[in-house]
Image (cartoon, rainbow, N blue to C red):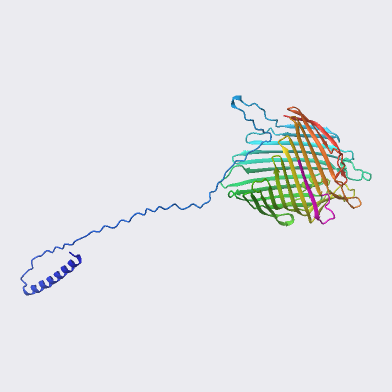
Amino acid sequence: MNMQRTKITLCLALTLLGRASQSFAQQRTDSTLPPATIEVIQTYQPKVKQTPKPDFKPDLPPHDTSRPNFKYDVPQQTLYYTYSSLPLRPLALGKDSSALPFANYAMMGGGTQSSIFFDAGIAQFKDKNYNSSIHLHHLSQEGNIKNQKSSLSGIEAEGTLQTNGNIWCAGIDIVRNRFHYYGYDHNLYDYSSLQSQITYTGVKAFVGVQNNLSNKFGLDYKATIGFTNYNNDQGISEQGISFDVPVSKIIDSSFSAGVGINGQYVYMSQSQATFNNYILQLTPNVSFRSAGFKAKLGVNPTLGMNGNSYLLPDLSLSYIPAKTSVLIGLGWQAHLQANTLRELSNQNPYLFPTFDVQQTRIDEIFASVESKVGNHFSFGGKFSWFQYNNLPLFLNDTLDQKQFYLLYDSHVTAIALQLTARYQIARTISVGLSGIFTNYTQSSYAYVWHQPGVRLKGDFHWKPLPKLDVAAYLNVMGGLYARNQAHQAVKLPSIFDFGFSGEYQFIPRLSAFIQVNNLFNNQYQRWYNYPVYGTNLIGGLRLKF
C-alpha cells in the first residue's frame, strides 16, 4: 500500500463523514452516531546505509629535511714538559719501575769578560689538577772598553689549576736589567760607572681562565687580565693594565663565529710630562672550513690614544690541495702597537731619557706557502707588503753620541721576503735556517735608521752520543744605517755572529757545559758606537734534582 495515497483517502473520508453527520443531526436531533474505530496500517521498508570501503593505498611518512648537527666535546689535556710516557710491557714482567726524569735543574758557570752565569728551573710542584714552573736567570759581563758592561736578571713563574669545566692560570714576570752607556768618544768624555749606568726594573702579573669542557651555551672562552709596572732610574715610569676576552662558538662542522674585546691602558710619566697610552679593540670574526679551505673574516674597530679610531682588517685564506702537503695562504692583517717604555727599551736600551709617545699602525698584505718533503724536511716562504704609520726609529744624534733619540716616521712602506727551512730526525739531529729580506721602498727620512734590511738566523743540534749534546747558532744582519758625528749617513758593517755549545752528562744528576759566542771575534755594532764584547766563553755545571 502506498503511504502517501492512504493518507489522502483517509483525510477525505473523515471530511465527508463529518459533514454528513452534521446534516443528519440537524434533521434528527434525537439520534446519536455510534462510535467507530479507524485502524491505519502503513508498510515500512528499512534501508541499510552503505559502509564506506577502506582505502588500501599506503602513504609514506613525510621526508625529514632537517640537517643533523653532530658535536663532539673533547676535553683539553694538560701537558707537563717533564712527563715521559711509560713503555708498554707485558704483564708477566711485573711492575714497571722506570724513573721519571728530574723535574728541576740548576746551571752555574763563569767565563771570559768577567762573566757570571746562573740559570735554574723548578717544576716539581705539580699534581693531577695543577702544575707550575719557575725560571730564574742571571748573566753579567764586562768588556775591555770603559763602562762596557751589563747585568741581566729575571724570574718568571707560572701555574695552572684545573677545576670542573675550567682551567685557571696565573703568572708573574720580574726583570732587572742594567746597562751602561759606553758609545761615546772616550778621548773627549770621561764618565764614571755610576754616571753612565741605566737600570730598567719591571713587574708584570696576569691571571686568566678558559673552559676545557663544553657548556650549555656551546661557547669557548679564554679571559686574561694583566698588570704592569716598569721604570728606569732616569725618571721614566709607567703603570698599566691590560685585558683580553675572546669568545667563540662552533656553529657546525664548517662555520664558527667569535667576538672578543681587548685593550690596555698605560700611564707614563717622565720629567714633567705625563701620557695616557691606551688601546681598546673589538674583534668580531667568522671562520669557514671545508674541503681543504680555511678562511677567516674579521674587521676590528679600534680606539687609540688621542681619540684616534681605526678599522684593522684580520683577513686570511688558506688552501691545501687534495693529496698534497702544500699549504697556500693569503691575507691582510693589521695591528696597533702601543710603543710603551718596556717595548722600546727591549729593542734599544740606550734611549734618551725623554721621548714622545705615539702609536704605530702596521698593515701587512701577504702570500705564503708551506710544505714538507718526506718525514724530515719542511720549508716555507712568505712575500709581504708592509705599511707603517709612525714607525719608531733610533738616531744617535745627541751631543756626546751615547744616547739615541726616538723618531717616528709617519709613513714607511716595504716589501719583505721571509724564508724558512728545517731538517730534523727525531731528537738526533736538527738543522734550521730562516731569513727576512726587507726593501724599504718609501720613507720620510733618508734612511730607516737602525732598522735592518737583512736578517738571517741558523741553528744546529746534534746528539752524537746518548750523553753528549752539541749545538751551534748563526746570526747575520745587514742594511743598517746610522748618522755619525758629522751628521752624515753611514752604513754599518754587516753583522756575522757564529757560536757553538756542548754539554756532556757524567752521571744522571750532573753534567758539564761550555758555550762559545762570536767565535770569529767580529766587532760588529748593532747600535752605532756600541761594539759587542767579541769572542767570549762561558762554562760550568748543570745539576738536576
Front position in the image: 176 or 57 = 57
Front position in the image: 13 or 170 = 13
Question: In the image, what residue occupies the spot 63% across and 34% down?
Answer: 128
Question: Is residue 524 inside the magenta stretch?
Answer: no
State which quarter of the image contains the N terminus.
bottom left
Question: In the image, what residue occupies the spot 74% across and 41% down?
Answer: 422
- Above or below residue 433? Residue 14 is below
Q: Which residues are magenta?
A: 432-451
Horizontally, is 308 left or right of 222 in the view?
right
Image quadrant of residue 445?
bottom right
Residue 255 lies, in percent from the top left, at 60, 51
Image quadrant of residue 202?
top right
Residue 91 in view here: yes
Residue 413 lies, in percent from the top left, at 78, 55
Question: In the image, what residue occupies the spot 29% across and 57% down?
Answer: 50
Residue furthest out toward the right: 187
Question: Is residue 438 inside the magenta stretch?
Answer: yes
